[in-house]
């Protein structure tokens, strides 16, 4: 089955990894296994999703096994996607209707990136894999010249974004954390909208929405 190149689907094609990126051996092995097991899945580095002119960049952890790794679109096809896109739709950062397949909604003024672009075993990338994939995140943020606010979803994404923005190790992770990068961009952080966090009440919809509302306040000061 033929699949598009990640660059063909991305708003920032020059910042994308090739479909058969060889840089992380552990992730390459898992990708090969899943391509044999599920040849109709995406099973490749997941491209950015959103607008090249975005003012808001949202950095996630990595593709989910049955989510973005299956569909090729960040947060599409798993529980966290329902929670995530419901917030964006409510606050006017997306239009359309969420489904478990790509192409049913569009982002408005926002773009979604990942700290690690390929599916990691047990959804747990290593620090070495984050460092290896970090140049793609760096290239993405460099390409997004209109971005003024970055939201990191979870501690892993926070560290990746903070390193890229020149804020690490001074900027430590906490829900609702806020830091100004040397170039003036602002990093906001939230707990990840994983099923584990939302089912246990560690992260509520109100808590999640408050971080995105803060981003909107930074763009549209009252």
Image (cartoon, grey):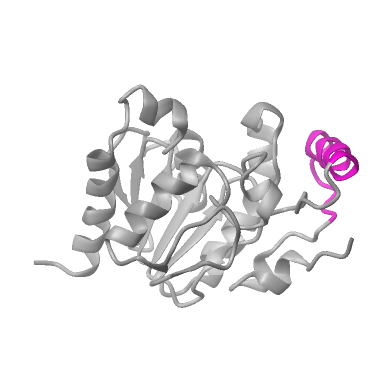
Residue 122 visible in rendering: yes
Q: Position of residue 211 (x, y in %)?
A: 27, 48
Residue 167 visible in rendering: no
Task: Please tell me which residue is depicted at 8% across the width and 66% down the height of the picture.
Answer: 222
- In the image, residue 124 sits, relative to residue 150, either above or below, namely above
What is the number of callouts on the image? 0
Q: Residue furthest bottom?
A: 53
Q: Residue furthest left?
A: 222
Give the side of residue 44 with respect to residue 156, left or right: right
Give the side of residue 172 with respect to residue 212, left or right: right
Task: Please tell me which residue is depicted at 27% across the width and 61% down the height of the picture.
Answer: 91
221 falls in the magenta region: no
Q: Position of residue 77 (x, y in %)?
A: 58, 48
Towards the viewer: 163 or 14: 14
Magenta span covers which residues?
Answer: 20-37
Q: Position of residue 221 (x, y in %)?
A: 14, 67
Question: Which image quarter: residue 198?
Answer: top left
30 falls in the magenta region: yes
Please tell me whether the stretch drawn in magenta is mainly helix, strand or loop: helix
Towards the viewer: 191 or 40: 40
- In the image, residue 40 sits, relative to residue 104, either above or below, namely above
Task: Please tell me which residue is depicted at 89% across the width and 61% down the height of the picture.
Answer: 1
Question: Which image quarter: residue 65?
Answer: top right
């Amino acid at each position: 089955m033929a699949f598009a190149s990640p660059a063909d689907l991305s708003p920032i094609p020059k910042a994308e990894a090739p479909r058969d990126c060889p840089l992380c051996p552990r992730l390459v092995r898992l990708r090969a296994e899943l391509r044999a097991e599920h040849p109709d899945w995406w099973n490749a580095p997941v491209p950015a999703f959103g607008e090249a002119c975005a003012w808001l960049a949202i950095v996630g952890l990595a593709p989910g096994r049955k989510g973005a790794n299956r569909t090729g679109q960040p947060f599409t096809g798993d529980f966290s996607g329902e929670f995530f896109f419901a917030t964006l739709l409510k606050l006017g950062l997306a239009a359309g209707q969420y489904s478990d397949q790509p192409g049913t909604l569009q982002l408005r003024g926002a773009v979604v990136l990942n700290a690690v672009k390929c599916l990691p075993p047990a959804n747990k990338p290593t620090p070495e894999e984050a460092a290896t994939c970090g140049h793609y995140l760096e290239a993405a943020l460099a390409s997004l010249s209109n971005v003024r606010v970055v939201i990191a979803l979870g501690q892993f994404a926070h560290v990746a974004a903070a390193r890229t923005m020149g804020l690490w190790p001074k900027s430590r992770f906490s829900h609702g954390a806020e830091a100004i990068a040397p170039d003036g961009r602002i990093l906001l952080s939230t707990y990840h909208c994983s099923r584990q966090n939302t089912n246990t009440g560690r992260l509520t919809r109100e808590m999640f929405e408050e971080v995105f509302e803060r981003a909107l306040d930074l763009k549209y000061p009252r």
